[in-house]
Amino acid sequence: MNDKFVFDILTHPSDYRETAKIIYGTDPYIYRDLFGDVENAQKILSYSFDNPESVFFKNAVYIVKSRITGEVVSCALFHTNDFVWDSNIMLSDFEKAGVVPPRSFFAAAEYMIKTYNFRKIGCSMCNISVKEEFRRQGIAFFMLTKLLKRNDDKTVELTVLKDNVNAINLYKKLGFRIIGEPFKDYGGHNSPEEYCYKMVLNR
């Protein structure tokens, strides 16, 4: 694995658009409602990655790149408790990008406030994804092992869809455990909620 891929924090603007595309694809509800479409996400996140007040600030974005092509193939966000969601900060990045927020923006923003501003346990990990053509190569395990080792003194929580068995098994392999019963979580603007699990890694 180490001879094919490299783990790093997002640093180079040349990687912004591809990373934004991967982030957009990590959730079929939230980012569609927040940004409208992937092109908007790429425009807006190019500003958010450089905005220290944004939950998408590049210091919180971990990526895996191909050593051969330099392509970003995977990413995850890792937030400590000093990251909070502020809709006005996000809207300022919309304005910089020249994008009009979709009508569903505030429904998704309300969910983001709940997710980032009222965390109960330690740090949070989210937007964990591998580009489809690179899946089943152990990249997610490689990335998360590196990320967690870099933050090995922290308790970490995440939310996962109840029916995402592959992801749940991966997190269990890394030491996460399910806490509590399935709960209803954001399923999209004017759409039914989805059942999810909360998982925690205590260290």
Image (cartoon, grey):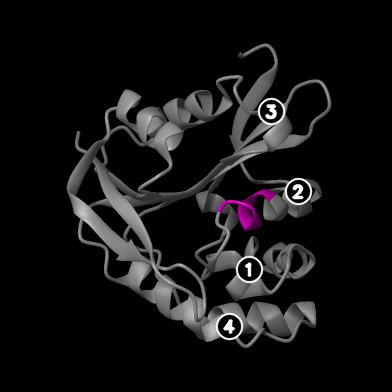
- Name the magenta segment's main secondary structure: helix
Where, quadrant-wise, is the N terminus in this rendering?
A: top right
Q: How many marks?
A: 4
Residue 83 placed where, x, y %?
40, 64
- Give the secondary structure at mark 2: helix
Q: CA distance from mark 2 to mark 3?
A: 14 Å
Q: Is residue 25 magenta?
A: yes
- Range of magenta residues: 22-26
Counting residues from the start of the chain, the first of labels 1 and 3 encountered is: 1
- Tell me: 42 left or right of 167: right
Quarter holding the C terminus is top left
Between marks 2 and 3 in the image, the one whose residue lies nearer the viewer = 3
Nearer to us in this view, 179 or 85: 179
Which residue lies under the disc numbered 2? 18
State the residue lying farthest toward the front: 192
Residue count near mark 3 (Cα–Cα under 10 Å), binned few <14, some 14–19, many ≥20: few
Residue under circle 1? 32
**Residue type, mark 4 in image:** Ser
Residues tagged 2 and 4 counted as in contact (Cβ below 8 A): no
Q: Are marks 4 and 1 in contact (CB under 8 Å)?
A: yes
- Is 191 in the magenta? no
Residue 104 marker: 4
| Of the pair 88 and 134, the residue shown nearer to us | 134
Which label number is shown at residue 134? 3
Image coordinates of residue 41 in percent, x first then y, are 71, 66
The residues tagged by marks 1 and 3 sit, at their Cα atoms, a distance apart of 23 Å
Q: Is residue 123 left or right of residue 45?
A: left
What amino acid is at disc 1? Arg
